[in-house]
Image (tube, rainbow, N blue to C red):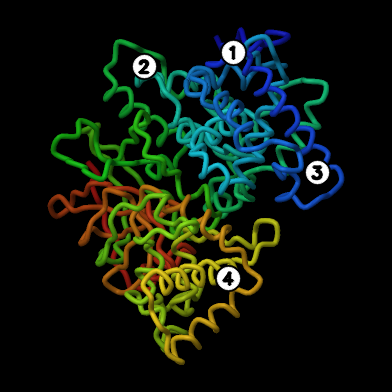
Amino acid sequence: MVNIYRAAYEVIIWLGYPEQKDEQYDAMNAITLMFLQIQKGLKQGNNMSTILELDEVGITVEEFQPPMRLFRSSWFQRTWVIQEAGVARRAFACYGNTHTNWNCIGIVAMYLFRYKKPFLERMDAMDDVYRVMQLYLMFLPLQRPTSFVEVLNEARPYLASDPRDKIYALLGHPMANCVRGYKPSGGPVDDDFENYRELAANLAPDPTYSRGGSWELLGRGTARFKSNDPVVIVDYHKPTVEVYRDFALALIERDSNLESLAAVQHAPTLDLDKDELPSWVPRWDCYSGARMLGYYSSNQLAGLGSSPYFTPSEDKNVLIVRAIFFDKAGLCTKVLERNLFTLHPVHKGNPILALWRVCGCDESDAVGGYPFLPVWPHSHRDKRVAYRMAWTAGKDLSELDGYNSEADFYAYLVHLVEQYVKDHGIVMNDAMQQDVDRLRELGATGVAERYQAAAAEVCHQRRFFVTKAGFFGIGPAAMRSEDEIVVLMGTGAAFVVRRDGDHHCNLIGECYVDGLMRGQAVQAWKQGLLVAADVQLR
C-alpha cells in the first residue's frame, strides 16, 4: 500500500461524515480561519502565543466544538492511516461535502498543541489534538523522528486491530531502513509545500524536535547509511510475542545501540511473572500516555563516555548488558496524572507543593545542599534548582522562545502557595510572608502556565522519586522503593531495574535523575567510585 500512496499524484483522505448535519462546514471554516490567522501572524512576526486569540477570530468555545469533533474522528486514531497521509505527494482531507489541504489541519493542530494547552485541557482535547499533530509530523521531512524507535513510540496512541501491525504498518516509513543520523530525502511535492514546512518548523512542539546532538556525542550520529534490507520481514504466522521480541533484537543488532530500551513501558500494576514478553522488549501496542524522556530534553547523556555494550544470549528472552549501579530509590510518589498540576483550580494533591518541604527545598541549607558525584562535569548546585529541573526531566524552558525557566517555576510555586493558604484559612506570620514575598520576587517575570504545562506533560503516568542518597528524579509508573537506578553503557537514558537474583534484572523503564544525565556515572565508574557489572535482562 505504501508504494501506491507514494506513486499517486494526489491522495484524497476521507474523514467521513460529521455526527451533526451540516457541521462539516462549521468545522472546515473554523480550521481554515485559524490557519489563515496563524499564517498571517507568522509572516508579520507577531507574538506566537497571541497570534490566535479566539475572540479576535470570532471563534467561541461553542463554535470550536465542530473542529474538535473532527479531530476526534476515528480516522485519526488508526495506525495504518499514518502512511496514507505521510507518503502522499499531495493530500487533501474530505469531511462530508467539504475539503481542505491536509497541511492546514496539521498546522492548526501544531499551533493549538504548542500555544493553547490550557484551552485544550478545558475542552478535554489534549490527546485528540496531539494525535492529529503527530500524525502530521510523522513523515514530515524535519529532523525528527531521528530513529525508527522514535517513529514507533510516537505511533503508540494509534490503534490497530492486530497488535503486530503496530510494527508492520510503519515499515513504509523512511526511518524503518535507516540507522539514527540518516536524514531521508523526499517528501511531499505540493507546490506550496516549502511554505507549509516553514510554518511547521516554526510551530514544532519544542527545540528538541530538531535535536540530534546528544546522539552524536554518544557516537551514534555519525553512522549515516540506509540499509536495503528490512529490519523485519512481515510474517503473520508468528505470534505477537515472537514478533515483538525478534524485532527488538534485530533493531539492537542493526543499529548497534540500546535506544529501544528507553521505549519500554510497563503498567503500574506490573506482574513480571505473568508477562509473556521479556521486560526489556517494548510493548508497542500498550500506550500509557508517557513519551520517551528524550523527547523533552537533549540532556539525556547518562552514558556519555562509554561505548554500547550488549550481548545476545542463547536464550532469546535474555539480553546481556553492562550496567553501572548508581543508587536505590527511596521515596516514590503515587503514579502522577496531568490533572494533579492544574492551576485553575489548584489540585489539592499537587505533588510539587506537597514535596517542596519534604525534599528540604524550604530550608536555609537548600542552596548548595544537593548531593553530587565528585567528577566532571560538576553538578554541584542547590536543591531548588535540582527540584525544578527534575519535574521537567531537565527541560530548560529558556530553550523555547526565550522563556525564563526559573521565573516560570517560581511563578507557578507562588500561585500554589497562595491558593493553599487561602483554601486552608492560614494566617501567615512575618517569616512566612517574607518567604512568599521572596518567591514572588523570583517569579515576577515568569508565567506559571508554562511551567505547569511542562511538568504535567513530563510527569503524566510517571513517579517522582528521591534516591537513598538524596538525588531527585522522574521514573516509570511501575517503579517502587528499593528499585535500582543504573546507567547502561552507551545509552542516553538512565534506567530503573529490579533485581531477580544475583545477575538477573528486570527492566522497569527509563528515568531522569538530576545530576546523573551528563555522563557523571561513567566518570565515577572510571575513577572507581561506582561499580559496573554484566547483567542479564529478562
Q: CA distance from mark 4 to mark 1?
A: 49 Å
Residue that badge 2 annotates? 161
Which disc is residue 21 wearing? 1
Residue mark closest to the camera, 4 vs 1:
1
Q: Can you identify the residue that label 4 sits on?
A: 406
User: Mark 3: which secondary structure?
Assistant: helix
- Position of the C terminus, as image quadrant, is top left
Q: Nearer the viewer, mark 1 or mark 3?
A: 1
Q: Quadrant of residue 421?
A: bottom left
* Position of residue 59 in the picture relative to residue 213 (left or right): right
**In the image shown, does 206 or 17 lie closer to the viewer?**
17
The span from disc 2 to disc 1 (Cα, nearest Å) is 30 Å
Tag 2, which secondary structure?
Answer: loop
Q: Of the residues tagged 2 and 1, which is closer to the observer?
A: 1
In the rendered image, residue 494, in percent from the top left (x then y), is placed at 39, 56
Foreground tag (3 vs 2): 3
Q: Amino acid at mark 2?
A: Ser
Quadrant location of residue 371? bottom left
| Circle 3: residue type | Leu
Check if mark 1's residue and mark 3's residue have beta carbons within 8 Å: no
Q: Which residue is mark 3?
A: 42
**The disc labelled 4 sits on which kind of residue?**
Glu
Instruction: Work out whether mark 2 precedes mark 4 in sequence or the reverse, and give the earlier one.
Output: 2
Residue at (46% x, 57% y) in the render = 345
Residue 390 lies, with reference to residue 93, above or below; the image says below
